[in-house]
Amino acid sequence: KNQVEQSPQSLIILEGKNCTLQCNYTVSPFSNLRWYKQDTGRGPVSLTIMTFSENTKSNGRYTATLDADTKQSSLHITASQLSDSASYICVVSPTGTASKLTFGTGTRLQVTL
Amino acid sequence: EAQVTQNPRYLITVTGKKLTVTCSQNMNHEYMSWYRQDPGLGLRQIYYSMNVEVTDKGDVPEGYKVSRKEKRNFPLILESPSPNQTSLYFCASSLGGLAGPYEQYFGPGTRLTVT
């Protein structure tokens, strides 16, 4: 049972536009929630890490939000660029599991001209 | 340059032939982990290590072994590979355990095909 669900599965947007990716999780309690960017065939790269008490975290044009009450997180990309084309993965670190992560299956974003 | 390296990057092998995928990090990280990534399933953790000589199972450890004799190295061993282990494998490391706010660095991946 996947405890981290991401939507949409895939998304196509025009360069320069903004977009928001969603992550719903049932993992509770949790220590932190992470967003990764993964280019095709390459290792994921960390974008943001938020503890359960944080509401928002930014990294350049990427802004992640967290609502622990509704168990939702979102990743907002501002002024998209062609290089933003990648998969974006939401990951939750459950509390009390030593050191494991629960991964979402990702949103595939394609930015076009 | 701070990095996680994996070798080989690509490997095609036959069922039952033992193989080792090496992983090394130069950041003096305590925590290291192995993942496999399959279409539609996302990343799944195989094994992780909190420090030298300390390893533990992840979500899909069957058919794999690991060792952590040195802090920088964390090899993944497939004693008798089977076709269902065909996958893209990633090694990762971080300064501390993932319950803490430590950034995790991933290697470039090893694409394994078992025929």
Image (cartoon, coloured by chain):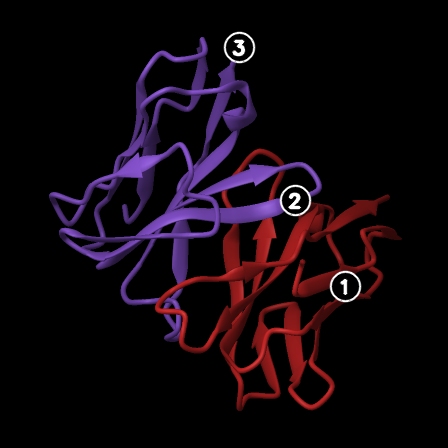
> Of the residues tagged 2 and 1, which is closer to the observer?
2
Residue A95 sits in which quadrant?
A: bottom left
Subunit that carries the residue with mark 2 = B
Question: Separation of disc 3 and disc 1 at Cα?
Answer: 45 Å
Circle on res. A79:
1
- Residue that label 2 marks: B41
Amino acid under disc 2: Leu
Q: Earlier in the sequence, mark 2 or mark 3?
A: 2
Q: The red chain is which one?
A: A
Q: Which of the two marks, 3 or 1, is nearer to us in this view?
A: 3
Residue A29 appears left or right of B19? right
Q: Looking at the picture, which amino acid does disc 3 mark?
A: Thr
Kindly tell me whether residue A75 is visible in this rendering.
no
- Reading the image, the residue beneath label 3 is B115
Query: From the viewer's perspective, is A87 left or right of B47?
Result: right
User: Residue at image x 55%, y 88%?
Assistant: A54
Q: Give the structural element (helix, strand or loop) at label 3.
A: loop
Q: Say whether mark 1 and mark 3 are on the same chain.
A: no
Q: What colour do you see for chain B?
A: purple
Task: For mark 1, name the chain.
Answer: A
